[in-house]
Amino acid sequence: MKYMKAVQIFFIFLGLTLIPPVYAKAVQAIKISYITQEQNIPSALSNLDVFVQNKGMMGANIAIDDNNTTGQFTGQTFILNRIVVPVDGNVIQSFKQQVSADTPFVIANLPAQVLKQLADLDSAKDKLIFDATTTEDDLRNRECRDNILHMLPSRAMRADALAQYMMKKRWNQWLLVTGMTQGDQLYAQAIKRAAKRFGMKIVAEKKWTHTYDARRTAQSDVPVFTQGIDYDVLVVADEQGLFGEYLDYRSWLPRPIIGTQGLVPTSWHKTHEQWGAVQIQNRFKALAGRQMLEQDYGAYLAARSIGEAAVRTQSNKMQTIYDYLVGDEFALQGYKGNPLSFRSWNGQLRQPVLLAAARSLVATAPVEGFLHPKTELDTLGFDQPESTCHQEVINDNSVVPINTNSDIVQDEITVDKLIQQFKDYYNNLKGNK
Amino acid sequence: MKQGQLALVVLAVLFSFSIHAETVIVTLEKDNALAVIDPIEGKLIKTIPIGQRPRGIALSPDNKFLYVATSDDDTVKIIDAETFKEVGELPSGEDPETFALNPTGDRLYVSNEDDHLVTVIDIVNKKEVAQIKVGIEPEGIAVSSDNQWAVSASETTNMIHWIDVKTNKIVENTLVDARPRAANFTADNKQLWVTSEMAGTLMILDVATKQIIKKIKLDIQGVSFNKIQPVGIVIDKERVWGYVAIGPANRVAVINAQTLEVEKFLLVGQRVWNLAFSPDQKRLYTTNGRSNDVSIIDLEKHQVTKSVAVGRFPWGIVSKP
């Protein structure tokens, strides 16, 4: 008996001494799922750009590595479960089967339609979904969901960025050329909204209905197509890149191209090097063997947001992380100068929008001089008074709850004031023109 | 022939006299060169080719050698501070940018930004003695003058890592505001000053507790928030004044180091990056990356007295008695 006890003690002692010091501190696990669906290779205008299948995933990977480096010092480990649904697979089913109940965070690289279905699932109700890809304004307005945060700038934010720069240049006569897809229509809508907002004039609007194999006909089609209209810039809405590249140098008048081609508003671009961006560009290239793309940046920011919130709050709980993310403290470094944060009224990540030409970064929006009572970043996209997303955010006083208590009077005054400030601001802008 | 030689000797003597007054040496990131300035005259004396993309620079405690990080050559060069001839190289690891010299002048602590490491180099034997894993994108680095702490600021991890110089191990980490850039100890080693580029703050850390004891938000009237990106910090020996370079705000903040309040902002050149005192601490020199000059500040009057054009992208700066 005595002998046994001695052996026990010996083993306990041995066990204690063998435990490496790193495990002495309990490690907190933060579980994240990344979900995407493989795509068929779309038809493209040019063979110059190689189709990238793993857009997004690489951004999540590098952010998880970054988080885990920080995690070593805070006793936290970030676990990424990668789910790639095949082309003919069912995303919803894969989500149900492969995202465990104890995973609070999901990074989604999915089209808006699928994302909406996914967010509405019962099993997704207690999860926080980071939309790393979509640019849909509807999804941020009347179709908005409480459990989604949007990482990339919406079409409206992009269009506003373009309009601000055009206003600075005083290139305010626009010819709008729109393609045939639904995305193109939505892009054109955003352009029209921005034009109105910043006092630009759309002098003509044309639909591109010509053959997509523009290599054959561009030289003859484009001059005729653009003839007879006087304008400062040609704004093109061609999200898939089916014809937009062929407008430049072929229009009747010598005019720059902006929009989905030419000078593009984007959240990330290979020409971006300022504010430490060159470091992430290099690190990404070393890891992925290619340039960082927008979806990669979106997924990177999603995983980094989770990392930043988890480190600052020392928590792996959905509600705690969510409250921190939409609160005032959150400041994400996104290599674009300003700290990034979430708009509490629709879950959109506020951020500067880059205006990039193929081989040079032309400007960053908000363009200097565009002011806002709260933050200049909110001169881009749908501001709080304009938002039609009435999500109720728990623990956030800045959002007006609908149909509720006596606080509403107080809140309405604030909103009214904001609307007034906003109106004054734009009237001023128009007046100065 | 003999006369020519004599003339050369005379010239050399004259030249060495003028150098002995005080020289300021600046790395020119884009010109791949060092600029040598006479700060009293406010004149550029000469420019010397040095290697690819020179950034960090330090002077040995005996004033005999300069250490210059030539980032694209992946090395730290040892330069004779009198003749400006290269006398050796140190194994810095990849892409060295910023580094700190310990007070005895025998160890160099280099940030390797892309590999998330701090490399410790034995200067005498020109050997790497340790590599310490730190957070993502380490940049600012400093060694306390009592040779107890080396601190590394990692820009994406947002931490100050406290490295015990005896063991070369991290013993503590302090979470700070987003994108910490530079760190510097006060001469009494009681405080560590750290700048955050993203939050636009100067944070004062207590060295004993490793906690932030004060945050100073650097607001400048009429300058938009995204231009407030504080970088380099220096604090005088008596801890009366501290100075912070605020990058694209084109200003240097004058901080009362006793009350820890901002006293005023001095307008200097564009994108002011790094700072150096004159040996007698009567003047402050700034590198202005975008306007390609060095501003000279009179510290008795707190006035900018001169700006000296030096070449493209001045980055690091030291002053030699």
Image (cartoon, grey):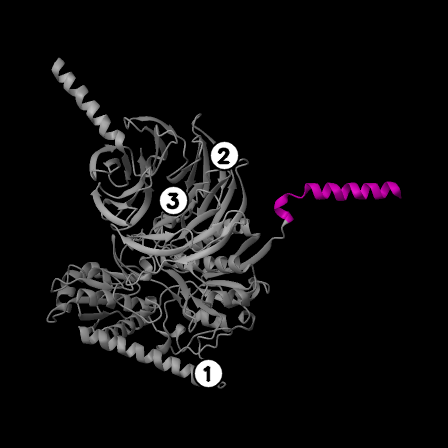
The residue that mark 1 highlights is: A402
In which image quadrant can residue A160 be found? bottom left
Specify the segment rendered in magenta. Answer: A1-24
In which quadrant of the rendered image does the C terminus of chain B lie?
top left
- The amino acid type of the residue labelled 3 equals Asp
- The amino acid type of the residue labelled 1 equals Ile
Q: Please state which of the two labelled residues, at mark 2 or mark 1, is closer to the viewer.
A: 2
The residue that mark 3 highlights is: B236
- The amino acid type of the residue labelled 2 equals Ala
Q: Residues within 10 Å of mark 1 (few under 14, many from 20)?
A: few
| Residue B130: numbered disc | 2
Chain assignment, label 3: B
Q: Residue at x 25, y 61 (%)?
A: A261
Q: Whole-percent x and y of residue A4?
A: 85, 43
Tell me the CA gap for discs 3 and 1.
Answer: 57 Å
Q: Please state which of the two labelled residues, at mark 2 or mark 3, is closer to the viewer.
A: 3
Q: Whole-percent x and y of residue A169?
A: 18, 64
Q: Based on the picture, tell me whether residue B21 belongs to the magenta stretch.
A: no
